[in-house]
Image: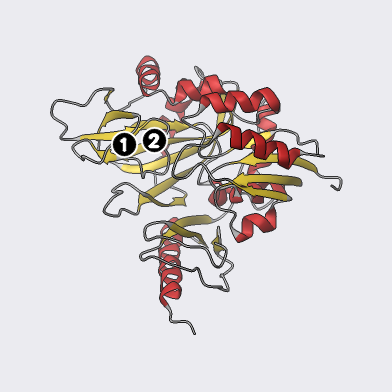
Amino acid sequence: MGDARAVLIAAISGRALAASARRAHLRPLVADCFGDQDTLALADNHVTLSSGLERPFDQQEILAVLERLASGDRPIGVVCGTGFEDQPDLLESLAARWRLLGNGAKTVGHIKDPVAFSGLCLAVGVPHPEISVTRPRDPTGWLAKRRGGAGGSHVRRADDPIAAGAIYYQREVAGRPVSALVLAHRGVAKLVGFSEQWSAPDRQHPFRYGGAVQPAELTHGTQAAMVESLARLLARVPLEGLNSADFLVDGDRFWLLEINPRPGGTLDIFEPHEGSLLGLHIAACERPLDDGPTWCGEAAAAAIAYADHDIAVMPAIDWPTWTRDRPRSGITVKAGQPVCTVHAQAVSAAAARLLVAARVSSVLAELKRPRP
């Protein structure tokens, strides 16, 4: 087992958390849905989950898998990534067995309840789009969302007949999607950084997540107003560790769409040159925040390369160093599913975004290359 402490990680994809755990000198014990090559290389032990993608995480499976991963070890706790936002009961069950390094079931349930969150925003004066729990009589200009959904694939326009699941409706507003990554401890938070997102729509998923780049282009006034709004809101919610807040920004106006109460998809592009964001996350769950900076580095971008055709058998590829979440050879990937994550660093956010787009195209071209 060595001298390093172990930490349990459970998420739809656990690779970024596992990489950050290694940087924090922790041994990651990972349960996720993919079992990608680099995740397996990073993990001290790993189990691939059968639930979490096509259906919600199965509570019995998660508990049994984590028990198996922790067997013979003494993990410091469990970190939950993407996939638990709509399952506070599962978080409660995990907390009954291990120390939960992150937000508890009550906090997650409250922050992901669209009615409660809308009321909270109204109470503290944070701009938030109008919501409805029933389908508007005229659905034009409204979006249908799944409570606790992540990644944008669950978002539909309200007049789309495909919309289903635990639905609520949100008035569509204009703006660029910008996310704030914050580190919190019992209602006190500090900014890690702002990133700007973009979508990669296909026919079935018009708002599917495409990628993110940091730093986001914001005026000092807009940035200060967004930080101050978050401070008012988070003073009412005892968030712990890393969390992200999703905004739409239109000039100097902005709307807070939602808060994701867990380490999210921008972990990689904000990871410091020295140290570990997961290490900071765990520290913030244990004690008050210090006054030092949380991150300093060059502009970075990450994007998802989605398969544009069915791949019956994933070929053995010599993956470039700038790819992450590298799929195992021999698996099947359907058109529209993620192939891997592509990263880029550059002297500016604009340059990083251009480079990451070129690299996505390079990966997709490689997958179409004839092989013997």
As drawn, the residue found furthest toward the bottom would be 372
Instruction: Say which residue appears at 21% left-offset and 26% top-offset.
Output: 135
Residue 270, placed above or below residue 336: above
How far across and how far down the image is residue 141, in percent? 18, 35
Q: Foreground: 285 or 93?
A: 93
Instruction: Say which residue appears at 52% left-offset and 25% top-offset.
Output: 88
How far across and how far down the image is residue 145, in percent? 32, 34
Q: Foreground: 311 or 125?
A: 311
As drawn, the residue found furthest toward the right would be 3
Question: Pointer 1: what residue?
Answer: 252
Q: Is residue 99 visible?
A: yes
- In the rendered structure, which amino acid carries the disc numbered 1? Asp
Question: Pointer 2: what residue?
Answer: 221
The answer to the question of whether label 2 and label 1 lie on touching residues, with beta carbons closer than 8 A, is yes
User: Separation of disc 2 and disc 1 at Cα?
Assistant: 8 Å
Which callout, 2 or 1, points at the residue further toward the start of the chain?
2
- In the rendered structure, which amino acid carries the disc numbered 2? Gly
